[in-house]
Image (cartoon, helix red, strand yellow):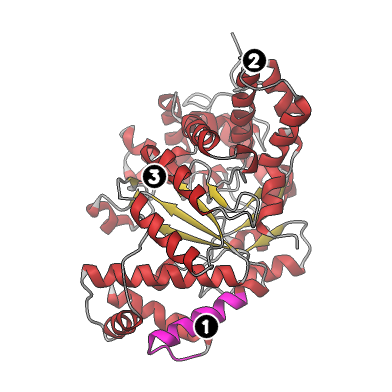
Amino acid sequence: MKKFLDENFLLETKTAETLFHEHASKMPIIDYHCHLPPDEIAEDKQFDNLTQIWLKGDHYKWRALRANGISEQYITGSASDEEKFHKWAETVPHTLRNPLYHWTHMELKRPFGIEKILNGESAAGIYKEANDMLQTPEFRTCNILKQMNVELVCTTDDPVDSLEHHKYVKANGKGIRMLPAWRPDKAMAVENSHSYNTYMDKLAEVSGMDISSFNDLLDALEKRHAYFHENGCRLSDHGIETFYAEEYTQDDLDNIFAKVRSGKKLDETEILKFKSGMLVVFAMMDYDRGWTQQFHIGAIRSNNSRMLELLGPDTGYDSIGDFEVARPMSKLFDRLESMEKLTKTIVYNLNPRDNALIASMLYNFNDGSTEGKMQFGSGWWFLDQKDGMEKQMNDLSLLGLLGKFVGMLTDSRSFLSFPRHEYFRRILCNLLGNDVENGMIPADMDLLGKMVRDISYNNARNYFGFYE
């Protein structure tokens, strides 16, 4: 019987052990997509306690707490941080076979070195032990990143963001590289004219220009895109249900923008046309500056309208959606390819039924210009767990080139989430190790070791252009 979370956790063969310990574990981390708050890195924040750094904002854990019958008071409500932690500790035993059980104990082990099993009985001691460490300089945010061998993080930033914190980190030599990533979702969110016009006013202010026409909008976004590029940005990100690829004309976009700017409500056709046009606009900007574009697709958000009203979005009420993917995806990429404006692209899928569809579709648009130009991204959100990662890598292997994969990212708001890279690397090494043991691939450790190092780090380093 194997011990839980020992040095060979998830590694089922000697080959897997060798690949992980001699190759994967030594590689630095490039976390090219996360939601870490830039201000908390810039200020080198020291958290008051384990709840603040670990539970606050983590809707994965919030969903489990609610399923365990825990009152909202102990999740997002007025209970003390210590009370909230104890409720989480009482919930953890019920997360067996949920990835939260693995993540919880991996995140206690690294960076805290705590190997006790978390439950209601052990909660008080673990809380005190971790809190004592959090009060030391070694557990400020920048040192946590260094402990986890994080070489570079890319945050997720709106076009109106000042990037002041990125500038500060660059100028003050904390030993951490933090770059912005362009997330322009609000610039195409015309379904609510009031919030959209409020956003347009912010964009006008930061760009220093009036935005009264669609061309004005393009000029303002181009100005901000250039500003992001000057500050090290090399990739964009779009959080969309599925791809938008409706037919539209320039007059359509001009008229739709004028209508929403006047405060009028758009119909569904107008909304889809505008979003379709904006995706092309953003893709062309990214191509012209040599950026990578990322698409996170497949989430159906804010399903519980009562809780949306009480708590707002991104509080644990999102799930996997079932949208049409193939036809609009093909149409968007073909539209860009026909203009020779299709840049490097990563698509992250949330519905596992669409894995093979996406992997096969993306490879229609490789052109030999860049190694791994079209990427089927790592398992995302509900799929960034053992089964989801294995399915993603298996479908990528069957329909593409696993060796050109740019690997894992945290997509997280927590400074304790970096063991997910270790989790991914162990799963990768185990897949390859099992294939070797079963005679499916050769036991060539030079070949396999290089492949593991590339997927863990080198491919991402070479792909994004962060070091040019």
- Amino acid type at circle 3 is Ile
Q: Quadrant of residue 37?
A: bottom right
Local packing at callout 1 (Cα closer than 10 Å; few below 14, some 14-19, many 20+) is some
Residue at the spot x=72%, y=38% of the render? Answer: 453
Residue at the spot x=70%, y=28% of the render? Answer: 20
Give the mark count. 3
Q: Main secondary structure of the magenta part?
A: helix
The answer to whether 141 is drawn above or below residue 87 in the figure is: below
Local packing at callout 3 (Cα closer than 10 Å; few below 14, some 14-19, many 20+) is many
- Labelled disc at residue 206: 1
User: Viewer-nearest of labels 2 and 3?
Assistant: 2
Q: Quadrant of the N terminus?
A: top right
User: Viewer-nearest of labels 3 and 1?
Assistant: 1
Residue at the spot x=61%, y=59% of the render? Answer: 40
Q: What range is drawn magenta here? A: 209-227
Q: Which residue is mark 2?
A: 437
Residue 164 visible in the snapshot = yes
Image location of residue 306, percent across then percent down:
22, 53
Q: Which residue is mark 3?
A: 75
Residue at the spot x=64%, y=53% of the render? Answer: 46
